[in-house]
Image: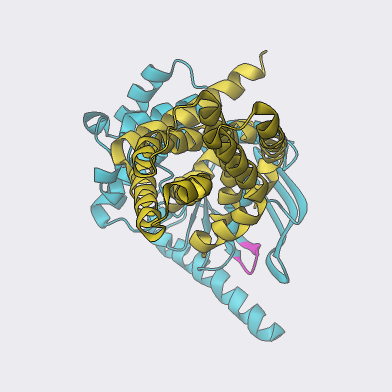
Chain colours: A cyan, B yellow
Amino acid sequence: MGALIEVRSLVKRFGAKIVLRQLNFSVEAGEFVALLGPNGAGKTTFLRILASLARPSMGEVWVAGFRLPQQAANVRRRLGVVSHQPLLYGDLSAEENLRFYGRMYAVKPLESRIDEVLELVGLAARRRDLVRTFSRGMQQRLAIGRAILHDPDVLLLDEPHTGLDQDACDMLDGVLRQIAAQGRTVVMTSHDLARVEDLASRFDVLTGGRITATQPAHGLARDGLLAFYRQALEAQRSLRGAVQ
Amino acid sequence: MSGLTPFLSAMGAVIWKDLRAEWRSREVISAMLVFALLVILIFNFALDLQPNVRAGISSGVLWVTLAFAGTLGLNRSMAVEKDRGCLDGLLLAPVDRAAIYLGKAFANLLFMLLVALIVLPVYGILYNTNLIIPGLLLVIFLGSEGYVAVGTLLASMAVQARTRDILLPILLFPVAVPVVVSAVKATGGFLAGLAWEEIQPWFTLLVVYDVIFTSVAFMVFDSVVEE
């Protein structure tokens, strides 16, 4: 298994509804993959399967050399996940939240790692404040701190910009750039190309439960990227129209 | 031993987190306590009975109060995990999920016992009953343990549903009948000053229920929370 994430012929069904159809996907170590697609394309379901929070109906999923769901505990150790929700306790302070998750991941030495992470996400000055007093943007930065606390090989981000204003988005992007610069492998979903165009090293489009287009970011101008995304969405619409 | 340490550490982390958050918000305990005291007061005025009749039903009143208040606490304790997506955060951790279950159940048991500790003196005054009987206190501990063991499991199932507030009592009450009945009977026995031989069958049933349901919940929690 050369790739850090390898997905082959993945199918996910919810009753009669098929959300992912024979999906194939591969990510090399150090890549920052933006997984683009319209609402309802199956991005969150796909990320939940990669995160071991949902089981595949069929197909093979390998993360960091471990197969899901059979070796889920090994995968979880190597994963950091950020979703729309912060996964943080409002009645605990920033450092208490990190201390709790640090104990769950057996992070050692924990206290110095908490200091490091709070510094990275720019919340060292607010470490003793309760999370429920934080703005949405600060909560999302702390959520990223929680996700990288145990130094995971792979970071999965499910539309982390949801509900953030422009300033908060810019601050979040700053943190994500620092994380990408550390050489971490990142898969981030978004339905908004503008949010990911400066961050990703590769763009994949997920429509109709499949990866329908892939484009490396290298040398691609903004116009080219927009054209690529529009073409991928258009091709999917035409295909759906033809089937109907 | 090497497998036990991370298990206990994760369990301890969950307990610490629940106690710490509750210390700040007092959301679960205050709701349970106010509810329990109101139920006791309502029963006190609704059942305006002779002292000898009252003694016969007071164990039932006590357990109805604890069971209803306990359901409220169980619901709230899991809702806190679900509302901010924290349940996913727990499930993403590379720990044995049984440790998460035991941590949540232990914290819930502490909340229920704390409420019982405050409710009992009030109950004793209103119903003119001496409740400081070691056997009775043990029954309250065992009854609460059984109720919380199965309640924590079912609350983690119910919390996934939109109708979680209604769903938990519907799921829990039928399953908890043996623990409530045996706890009521054993409590009644201690309050009436019956001989140990007469109380023992209910006491044994309570212990058996606790062992079986705690073990089953411990084993199936992983499957229950799996999507």
Name the side, left or right, on which A187 lies relative to A192.
Answer: right
Q: Nearer the viewer, residue B214 or B157?
A: B214
Q: Which residues are magenta?
A: A207-212
Report the residue at 60% width, 40% height from top: B183
Q: In the rendering, at what x and y percent does residue A166 appear?
A: 26, 56
Residue A158, above or below A41: above
Residue A186, above or below B16: below
Q: Nearer the viewer, residue A76 or B135?
A: B135
Report the residue at 31% width, 55% height from top: A164
Judge whether residue A238 is colored magenta. no
Q: Is residue B151 visible?
A: yes
Name the side, left or right, on which B90 lies relative to B121.
Answer: right
Q: In the rendering, at what x and y percent does residue B93 appear?
A: 56, 34
Residue A210: name its quadrant. Answer: bottom right
Q: Nearer the viewer, residue B163 or A101?
A: B163
Report the residue at 38% width, 40% height from top: B128
Farthest residue, direction left: A125
